[in-house]
Image: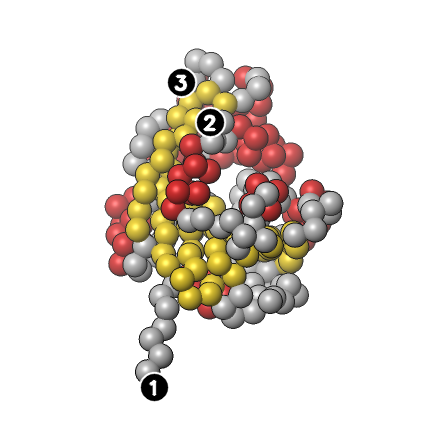
Amino acid sequence: MRSVRGGRGTPIPSPNIWHWPDVYEVENKAQDADGALWAAMSAAVDWTGGDVVDIGCGAGFHLPEFARTARHVIGVEPHPPLVSAARRRTRGSRNVDVVQGTAESTGLDASSVDLVHARTAYFFGKGSGPGIREAMRVLRPGGTLLVVDLDVSASPYGDWMRADLAHYDAAAVESYFDAQGFTLVRVDSRWEFESRADLRQVLGIEFTRKTAERAFGQISGLAFTVRYRIHTRVKPHTLELG
């Protein structure tokens, strides 16, 4: 079915997980505390018994969840330390492979998978063309590219992001995906931390110091709401004329 040799390309460094993988692990554990995002993803795409690719899988946090019902899961990650971490996490899973590669160059066979999942990887929309083309190449006809990103138009998380990214145009990003043939679903999810110290650490790797302190002061407990955008695009079946 597949090649899992990995691809090549020049990745864009991730400003959080590349430098603070332990804190990012805390963040992953806090995200989607009620499973709302996973439920919405499952409603959009059924990957049961299918072959799944997780683009930019990081330390592999989401791979085991896909592997529960998928036939085969491939994590693609450009950063070698994270590739190693993801392999350690999934070494007991027979249906999971992790390869070094990029969104633009996965190294996977054409028309070999049913779902390509990309979470917070195409945040700026414009410029994602090479990654979208690669996803369409590796998807089977009828397969789905599922892009999960933060909805910067929603408070409170969006307020903090806009404070640090003053030129970010959420409407333009959504228009980009719409023009590329994606559908859009918005999902409200809850992040919940085990301690205020964990919360403060995570805010510290996601925002500037000023914004992180402002956000920390606005959260009275251990939880807050984060809205996501789920964009999906299905690879069409080709019409054979004979």
Dot 3: what SS? helix
Give 78 or 212, whichever is nearer the viewer. 78
Residue 5 image point, x, y percent: 66, 65
Q: Earlier in the sequence, mark 1 or mark 2?
A: 2
Please, what secondary structure does the residue beneath circle 1 have?
A: loop
Residue 102 in view here: yes
Which numbered disc covers residue 242? 1
Label 2 crowd (10 A; few <14 / some 14-19 / many >=20): few
**What amino acid is found at the position of numbered circle 2 in the picture?**
Asp
Which residue, as the protein is rendered here, is positioned at the far top?
A: 220
Residue 239's image quarter? bottom left
The residue identified by callout 3 is 218
Q: Which residue is at a point 49% across and 17% down the rendered structure image?
A: 222
Please tell me the numbered disc located at residue 34: 2
Q: Observer-nearest residue: 8 or 66?
A: 66
Q: Amino acid at mark 3?
A: Gln
